[in-house]
Amino acid sequence: MARQGLNQSAIGSPQSAICRLPTVDYRMLLGKFRIVLLRKFEEGGAVEKEVAVLYKWASALALITIFYNIAEGGVSVGFGLGDETVSLFGFGLDSFVEVISGIGIWHMVRRQRKNPAAGPDIFERQALRITGIAFYLLTFGLAGTAIVNVFTHHHPETTFWGIIIAAVSIVTMWILIHYKVKIGKALHSPAILADANCTKTCVYLSFALLFASIGYELTGIGWFDSIGAVVIAGFSWKEGRESFLKAKGIGCKCQTNCPC
C-alpha cells in the first residue's frame, strides 16, 4: 500500500499535471509581435523613401538632359551658321528636337512616381507626335541641303568646333546613359531603361559629327561635311519613326521591353 501510494504520488493526478504546464505570458508575446510589426513598417518606410529618392534622381537626369540639349543646340547652330557647316548645324537642330522628347520623358518620370502602373497620357503622346514631325522635317531639310552642297562644291570654313562639340557630347551622353541605366535597374523601370538605351542614338549622332568634322579638317574635302549631314538625317528619320510608333503605343526598337 505504501509503494502504491508512492507511485500515485509520483505520477500525480491529472489536475496536478495540468497545473505544472508552463504558463504563457501573452503580454510578452503581444509585445514581441508589436516589435516585429514596427520593424516591418520601418523597413517599408525606408523602401518608400529610397524609391522617392531614386525618382528624384531620375527626374533630375531628365532635366539635365533637357538643359544640356538646349545649350548644345544653341552652340551648335551658332557655330554651324558661322562656319557654314551643315553637319554641325543639323546636329544642333537635332538637339533642339531632343528637348521636346526630353520634356516628355521628364513628364513620364513624374507620372510613374505617382502611379507606376499608369500608361502614357495625352501629354506624352502629343509630345511624341510633335517630336516625330520635327525629326521628319529635319531629315528632309538636312538631306536636301547636303545634296545641294555636293553639287555646288560647298566647303565649310572650318569644322574645328564640330570636333569639340562632338567630343563633349559623347562624354556627356555616356555619363547620362550610365546613371539612367543604374536608376532604371534600381526602380525596375523598363521605361527609364528604354530611355537610357535610346540615348545611345545621341552618341551615334555625335560620332557621325566627329568623323565628318575630323575628315574635313584632315583632307579639306567638302563631301565629308555633306556625308555627315546625310548620316545625321538618317538617324533623325529613325528617331521620328520611333516617336510615332511610341505615340501609337506600338513600342520602339531601342529596347525590347519598351512599355510605350
Image: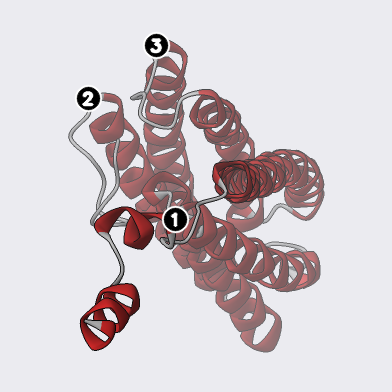
Q: In front here: 103 or 206? A: 103
Q: Residues within 10 Å of mark 2 (few under 14, many from 20)?
A: few
Residue at which label 2 appears: 248
Q: In front here: 142 or 109? A: 109
Q: Earlier in the sequence, mark 1 or mark 2?
A: 1
Taking the spot 43% from the left edge, 35% from the top edge, the residue there is 135
Q: Earlier in the sequence, mark 3 or mark 1?
A: 3
Residue at which label 1 appears: 193
How far is disc 1 from disc 2 in space, using C-alphas? 20 Å
Name the quarter where the N terminus is drawn.
Answer: bottom left
In the displayed structure, would residue 52 be above or below residue 76? Answer: above
* Kind of residue at disc 3: Ile
Q: Is residue 109 left or right of residue 214?
A: left
Q: Is residue 11 left or right of residue 169?
A: left
User: What SS does tag 2 mark?
Assistant: loop
Taking the spot 74% from the left edge, 50% from the top edge, the residue there is 76
Taking the spot 55% from the left edge, 34% from the top edge, the residue there is 109
In the displayed structure, would residue 64 be above or below residue 167? Answer: above
* Kind of residue at disc 2: Lys
Q: Position of residue 60 (x, y in %)?
A: 74, 43
Instruction: Give the number of the mark in front: 1 or 2.
Output: 1
User: What SS does tag 3 mark?
Assistant: helix
Q: Earlier in the sequence, mark 3 or mark 2?
A: 3
Residue at which label 3 appears: 122
